[in-house]
Image: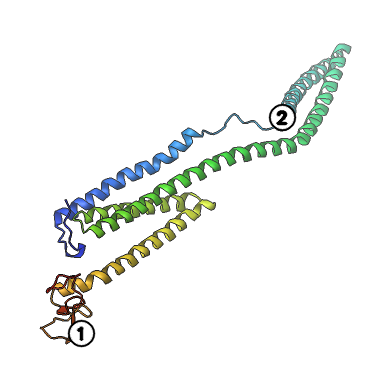
Amino acid sequence: MSARVDVEDIQTTKGEKLLAVVLAGFLLLGGIWAYSKIDDAVRTASPPNLSYRGTPSDQAAIAAERRARDRLDRATRALAAASRNLVLKREAYRTAIEANRPSDELGREYDRAQATLTNAQAEVVAANSVLQAAEPAAGEAESHILHVQTGQEHSRELLAFALRLLFVLANLLFAYWLLALLRRRGSRYYPVGLAVVGYAAVLALVMAGDYLTDYVDPLDLGPLVLSVFGIALTLLAFVVLQRYLAKRIPYRRVRRSECPFCGYPVRGNEHCEGCGRGVIAACARCEEPRRVGSSFCGACGAA
C-alpha cells in the first residue's frame, strides 16, 4: 500500500535502503545472466556453416593444388629413393672395377640408376612448376571461403549485439518509467525504483565494457550509443524532476508557513520579509484573504 505524500518527505529507513541495495544486486545477477544467454541463443539458432566449401570453381582450384602438392611429394620421395639407389649401384660398380672384375651388368645397372635419378629430378622440377601455377588460384579460393565463413560469424555477432542493446535499452526505459511512476504517486516503494535504475545503469556499463574491450568494428559504437542514450534519459529525468519540484516546492513552503517564492518564514504579514512579494491575496471566489500557493481557500474551500 502506498501513501500519497511527497517523495522528498518520505523518511527512508536503513532497512529499506539495505533491501534496495540487495534488490539491485539480485536484479543485476539475473540481468547479466540473461545478457550472456542472448549470445548463446543466437549461436544455437544460427550455428556456423562449417560445411561450406566454396563454389565449384573454388573446389576445383583447391583440388588442383592438392593434386599438384601430392605429385610433388611423390616426386620428392622418388628422387630420394633414386639418389640412394644410384649410390648403391655406383659403389657396387666401383668395387667390381677395383677388384679387377668389371661387370657389364653392373655398368648397365649404374647407367639405369643414373637415368632414373635424372628423370626423378625432372619430375620434381615439373611438379614444383605445376604447384606454383596452382597455388594462386587455390589461395584465392581459400580466401573466398574464409571470407564467407567470417561474414557469417560477423552477422551472428551483429545480431547478438543488436539483441543485447535492445535488452539493455528496454531495462533503462523501464527503470526510469518505474521511477517516475513511483515518484508521481508518492509511493513508499520509491527506493525500489532507485534500485531498478541502479541495476539498469550497471547493466549498461557491463555491456559498454564488454564491447569496448572485445570488438573494434562498427560494434564499438555500442558503448557510445549506450552513453548518449543514458545521458539523454538521465537529463530528461532531471528536467522532469525539476519541473515537478517547481510545482511542489511552493506548496510545501506554504505548508511550513514559508514564503512560496523564497522560503523565508512568514509571520502574518501580507508581504514576505525576505523577497518583498505578496504572500496574501484575495480568493477568486469569496475574496477572503488567502495564502498565495495554497491548494484550497480556507474560507470557501475553492481550489
Q: How many other residues sit within 10 Å of disc 2, few (<14), some (14-19) or many (≥20)?
A: few
Q: Which of 204/292 is in front?
A: 292
Please give the label number shown on residue 56. Answer: 2
* Image side of residue 196 versus residue 160, left or right: left
Locate the C terminus by quadrant: bottom left
Do we see residue 216 in this rendering?
A: no
**Vertical arrangement, residue 217 with respect to residue 232, above or below:** above
**Vertical arrangement, residue 150 with respect to residue 235, above or below:** above
Q: Quadrant of residue 286?
A: bottom left
* Image side of residue 19 versus residue 49, left or right: left
Q: How is the image coloured?
A: rainbow
* Residue at 23% in and 79% down: 261
Looking at the rendered structure, the kind of residue marked 1 is Gly
Across and down, in percent, residue 78 comes to: 75, 22
Q: Marks 2 and 1, how far apart in space?
A: 91 Å
Q: How many other residues sit within 10 Å of disc 1, few (<14), some (14-19) or many (≥20)?
A: some
Across and down, in percent, residue 283 comes to: 18, 77
Mark 1 and mark 2 in contact (Cβ < 8 Å)? no
Helix, strand or loop under label 2? helix
Outermost residue on the right side: it is 104
Looking at the image, tell me whether mark 2 or mark 1 is earlier in sequence order.
Answer: 2
**Vertical arrangement, residue 103 with respect to residue 242, above or below:** above
Please give the label number shown on residue 278. Answer: 1
Across and down, in percent, residue 155 comes to: 55, 42
Looking at the rendered structure, the kind of residue marked 2 is Pro
* Residue at 45% in and 45% down: 163
Please give the label number shown on residue 119. Answer: none
